[in-house]
Every structure is written in structure tokens, then in C-alpha cells.
Amino acid sequence: MGSDEKDGNYCSICGGIPPGKITTKRILVEGKETGIDQLDWIISDVAKQNLPNDAAITEALLLRVKKFNYVPTKKTEAYAAALLAEYKKLVQK
């Protein structure tokens, strides 16, 4: 797997991102593993704000997640719950 440096880095078998280069973090949304691009940065950025409550944290998380990822309107609440759970798991260790 690999490529000529001038062409970029891609899988020579499928043409996608090489498995070792995937950085999209996965969380469970309604029991289904879902990839969220930039999640580590999003959580770090929200944590720096020292927001006062879960509602404010959830709103900030969703705002940032929607900039980098598609969040289906019907699944917004499920994403919100999953993101807050992941935030608490990582920030409140």
C-alpha cells in the first residue's frame, strides 16, 4: 500500500485512504459505530471553553461536529447524546 509521493498517499488496492492513515474517530450513535472527523480536536476545543452545563457543552459539540460531518436531522438528538458521553469519557477522566 502506498503511492508515489507526488500523487499523494492512497491505498494501491482500493484507491482510498491507507488503513494506517485513517484518523476518523468512531463513537456509538444509537448502537451503531459512526465515524466523526476531527472529534479529538472538537472535544479539546470545547473543553477549553469551560462551559457551565451539559446543554451548553452539547450545543458546542454539535456546532463543531456539523462543520466537518453530516448529521442527519432526525438523528441530531442521538448524536448529541453520543457526543456528550464521549466528551465526558475523555474530559472527565
Image (cartoon, grey):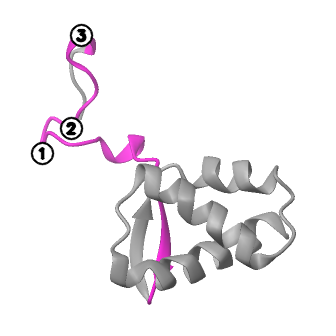
Position of 15 with respect to 63 (left or right) is left
The outermost residue toward the top is: 6
Q: Are marks 1 and 2 in contact (CB under 8 Å)?
A: yes
**Among the 4 quarters of the image, the one containing residue 39:** bottom right
Residue 44: image location, x then y, percent: 72, 50
- The residue labelled by disc 3 is 6
Residue at horizontal 72%, vertical 77%?
Answer: 55
> Dot 2, how many residues are within 10 Å of its Cα: few (below 14), some (14-19), or many (20+)?
some
**Among the 4 quarters of the image, the one containing residue 59:** bottom right
Task: Tell me, yes or no, whether the highlighted magenta stretch contains residue 92.
Answer: no
Q: Amino acid at mark 2?
A: Cys
> Dot 3, how many residues are within 10 Å of its Cα: few (below 14), some (14-19), or many (20+)?
few
Looking at the figure, which quarter contains the C terminus?
bottom right
Is residue 24 in view? no
Q: Secondary structure at mark 2?
A: loop
Q: Which residues are magenta?
A: 5-30
Disc 1 versus disc 3: distance between alpha carbons? 18 Å
Name the N-terminal-most of marks 3 and 2.
3
Residue at horizontal 80%, vertical 64%?
Answer: 91
